[in-house]
Amino acid sequence: MTSNSTVTYTSIDAKLEPSSTTKQMPPALFYPVNVKNLQLGNRLAVSSMCSYAAGPGNQIANLHLSRYKSFSAQHPGLIMIEGMCVDPKGKLDDKELGIWNDEQAKKLKQIVDEIHKDGCVCCVQLSHGGRKAIGDGEFDLNGRASEHNDSSRGGDDDNEILAPSAIAYDNRSKVPKEMTLADIQHAIGSFVEAAKRVVTISKVDSVEISCCNGNLLHQFMSKATNLRHDEYGCQSIESRCKILLDIIDQVRKAIGDDVPIFVKLSACDNLFKDESLDEFLSIADLIIGTGQVSLIHVTSGKITPNSKPRYSLNSDPNIPGHIPLASILKKHVKNKCLVGCSGALDMDVVKLNHYVDDGMIDVAFIGQGFLEMPNLVNQIAAKLNHKIE
């Protein structure tokens, strides 16, 4: 996704100033929206924010219970539970939450139950670190594999990390093993089993498949990290997307027809201005073409150490970084799929309301604001002169 493009984000920055009229009452941010069989009471969503504070067994801890209870007490339209790793080999951190066994799913249900008590809707993000992972061994303070790993943990095999191709993230990172077709099928199965667990055991309302931030699925998607020449290889957009499409298909079969599936998707690599967005739109078409995805959550970058912050590449730094990318996608897909994005969206609430009102995005994902302000939803309503019933 790095060649010159017919569609670029800088070409539309000037079009993103909101109109002066408001189409809806209540304000657009507080207008409900249906997502398959769910109704979100408003367009404000708590973004997925990894705390890396898992308890023993990579399970939910007390911090998570209090944090998500504080979110649900504010009644946002949607709460994204932080990324949960589907396979122990894919952990980004020893304290990352896992969802590779039933005990983890049972512990997660405690959070889901509390969220539901407040009448809120929740979604779990499913992920695998790929070449960014630390593996499943024990590590010292410098991130090196401990010498005292014993045979009961599988020895050096536990520290093996997997990726589409044997390319390290940077010169300090371990070179991953290039995945065999059997490894790929195992990874697909890990996503499917995790999705089934969170729906049947944890009772979440929706699942999000993470294909961004340089993780395993993003690594398959990017020509910078996928040098394969098999059916999951770099030769076409379709082959690079195949693992994601296979996961979507099999997850749908595992969780039934009613549970919405979201995809968090990287739009571009953030290496330079005017990167191509044509492939991004083609990938989105393939995803939507499955008929199984209800919402695409747009993000970008982090595939290589050279990826730049999104805001540094936009023409107007006063526009939240991912709004231009998400608005291009929304214009392209129209009503075939809901579109959301994150990234400092609450820095100007009035403009954010207009972005939703003008149809540039459908859902606003906000992270840090919910951590810093225990009454963020009410504050946003007040700034828009809206009284929450």
Image: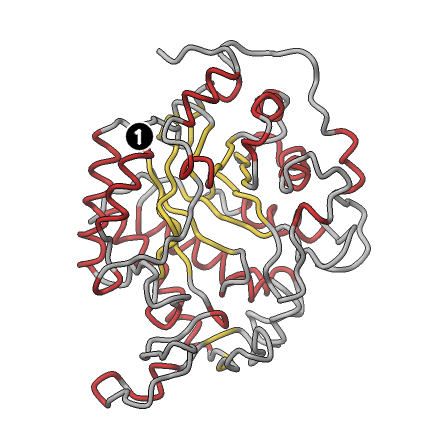
Tag count: 1
Work out which quarter of the rendered image holds the C terminus and state it: top left
Relative image position of residue 260 (x, y in whole percent): 39, 40
Relative image position of residue 105 (x, y in whole percent): 22, 54
- Taking the image as shown, residue 120 lies to the left or right of residue 283, namely left
Look at label 1 and name its amino acid: Cys
User: Where is mark 1, residue-wise?
Assistant: 120
Q: Is residue 379 above or below residue 52?
A: above
Nearer-the-camera pick, 44 or 381: 381
Quadrant for residue 57, please give it.
bottom left
Work out which quarter of the rendered image holds the N terminus and state it: bottom right
Local SS, label 1: loop
Quadrant for residue 113, please give it.
top left
Q: Residue at x 55, y 62 (%)?
A: 214
- Taking the image as shown, residue 383 lies to the left or right of residue 39, namely right
Quadrant for residue 37, please give it.
top left
Q: How is the image coloured?
A: secondary structure
Q: Is residue 133 above or below residue 3?
A: below
Nearer-the-camera pick, 107 or 100: 107
Q: Residue at x 77, y 44 (%)?
A: 7
- Taking the image as shown, residue 31 lies to the left or right of residue 220, namely left
